[in-house]
Amino acid sequence: MTSGEIDQATGQLATAVGAVALVSDAAYFAFVAVGEPFGSINDVGYAATGILAGALAWRLRSRAGTAPTAAALAGAAVAAAGSGLVLTGTTGWLLAGFVSAVGFGLIGPSVVAANSSLSADGLVPPRLAVLGRTAGSVMTLGLTAVVPVAMRVDDAATAPGWTWFTMVGWFGAVILYPAWAIWLGRVAGRRTGQAAPVAG
C-alpha cells in the first residue's frame, strides 16, 4: 500500500492476522482443557500472529510513520522469538511469554499511529479508530515486561507478583488487536473500488 488508503491486500492481511490470533486463542483454551498438541499450536499461532502483525504494520507504514514501523518490524521478530524459546525448550513458558509481550509491545505504537492518521482523514469509522488506538496502547504496556526478561524470571511459583502485571499487553495483543484487525479488513473490503471516506 503506497497511497495511504486501505487497499484490498491490506484488508486481506488484516483479516488474516486477526483470524490467526483468534485461532491461537482457541488453541490456548483447548490446551488448558485437553493438553498437547494444542499448547504447541498456540505457540506457533502466536509466532505467526507476531510476524503477520509486522507485515501489516509495514503495509500501513505510510500512516504510522518510519519510527513506529521500524519498532513494529523489530517487535514482530521478538514476538516470534518468544514463541520459539518455549517451542525449542530453551526457556519455560513464563519467560517466553514475557519476551513475546515485549515484542507485541513494540508493535503497539504503530497501531496507535496508523489509526490516528486513518481517522484524521476519515478512512476508518471513528469507533474502529478508537478500538485500534486502545489496542495499540494496551499492547505497548507489554514493554514493561522487559524488566522480568532482564531478570530472567521463568518460574511461575516464585515469580514476584508485580511481574504478572507486565503481561497486560497480552490482552491488547490477543483480544483487542485481532478484533481491530478483522474489523479493518471488513472496512477495506467495503472500500474496494471506492474513493469516498468512510462515515459513521
Image: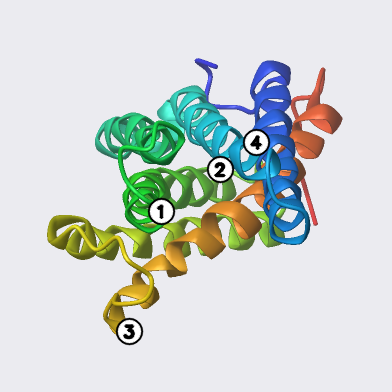
Residue matched to label 1: 97
Residue matched to label 3: 161
Q: Residues within 10 Å of mark 4 (few under 14, many from 20)?
A: many
Q: CA distance from mark 1 to mark 3?
A: 15 Å
Mark 3 and mark 1 in contact (Cβ < 8 Å)? Answer: no
Residue 8 vs residue 13, the one in the foreground: 13
Q: Looking at the picture, which amino acid does disc 4 mark?
A: Ile
Q: Residue at x 26, y 65 (%)?
A: 144
Can you give x and y, in whole percent of width and height, for residue 172 in the image? 53, 60
Q: Residue at x 41, y 66 (%)?
A: 167
Q: Residues within 10 Å of mark 1 (few under 14, many from 20)?
A: many
Mark 4 and mark 3 in contact (Cβ < 8 Å)? Answer: no
Residue 140 vs residue 166, the one in the foreground: 166
Residue matched to label 4: 41
Of mark 3 and mark 4, the one earlier in the sequence is 4
Decide: is 133 above or below 70. below
Looking at this rendering, what residue extends furthest in the bottom direction?
161
Q: Residues within 10 Å of mark 2 (few under 14, many from 20)?
A: many
